[in-house]
Amino acid sequence: MRVFITKDYEEMSERAFEIVKELVVENPYAVLGLATGTTPLGLYGRMKADHKKNGTSYRHVRTVNLDEYMGLPAVHEQSYAYFMKKNLFDGLDIDLNNTHIENGMAPSAEEECENYNRLLKMLRQDIQILGIGSNGHIAFNEPGTPFNSQTHVVELAESTIKDNARLFKDVSEVPRKAFTMGLKNIMDAKKIVVLANGANKAKAVKEAIQGNMSENVPASILQSHEDCTFICDEQAAALL
Ligand code: GLP
């Protein structure tokens, strides 16, 4: 596991952008595993600006997203499908048919999970971008999730509901359940880049990188990935 410590959020985003751009230029058919949350917004902003300025093309790129709230349709402003369209896809020349995310409105959750697992087998991530929750979760794999888990439905931890409430009008509007790629689906990626910024991530970053590998800290599984890089700003790296 490699760890880069950057001065601030902008430098963290720039480093991540350089990695993604190099991959897409080298392989125009790359599969990008993407994340939501506020952390990757600087990366996505740079991808859009670079596409506009330099014409870097995403026409053949395929994407798979980590997770989606259960019960929110793709047109809902707080759904992750909406987030991706607004914050990334609309600013690229990507074919929306090549972008994938769990369907929060799927009539059968079980079938949706099976379908997503099948899709991930065909679209193995060349790179998986991750954020990290303040409790050490990755995607929506909350503490206690088995390391060999695949796509499943989760009950969100109270701390996650509280963390994510800032994006909703009221905490009561945050869905209690979500679809998420499992830890095994994430570990199947050829390369993983974890982004973390801000003091509220410092404890999770320390436990993920230097703690024991334990299902109590889902991100600690990344210690056993052969090509995983953490890019943390100084505040997130403060306890290392
Ligand atoms: C959310 C998402 C994760 C994300 C994390 C951190 O719950 N499911 O994929 O990495 O929380 O979010 P943020 O980047 O806003 O701190």
Image (spheres, rainbow, N blue to C red):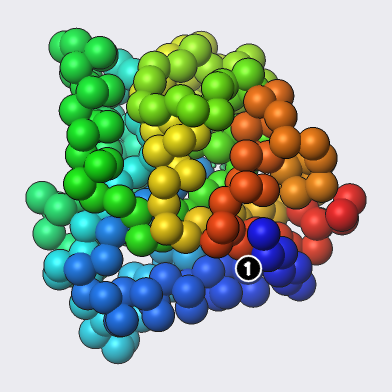
Look at the numbered disc 1 and say if its residue's Cβ is closer than 8 Å to ligand 1: no
Q: What is the quadrant of the C terminus in the image?
A: bottom right
Seen at 57% across and 74% down, the residue is 15
Res. 230 image quadrant: bottom right
Callout 1 amino acid: Met
Q: Name the one closer to the observer, 13 or 26.
A: 26
Query: Which residue matches tag 1?
Result: 12
**Residue 43: image location, x then y, percent:** 48, 65
On screen, residue 138 above or below 165: below
On screen, residue 168 above or below 18: above
Q: What is the quadrant of the N terminus in the image?
A: bottom right
**Residue 75: image location, x then y, percent:** 21, 33
**Residue 132: image location, x then y, percent:** 61, 42
Q: Is residue 29 left or right of residue 9?
A: left
Seen at 77% across and 53% down, the residue is 236
On screen, residue 185 above or below 108: below
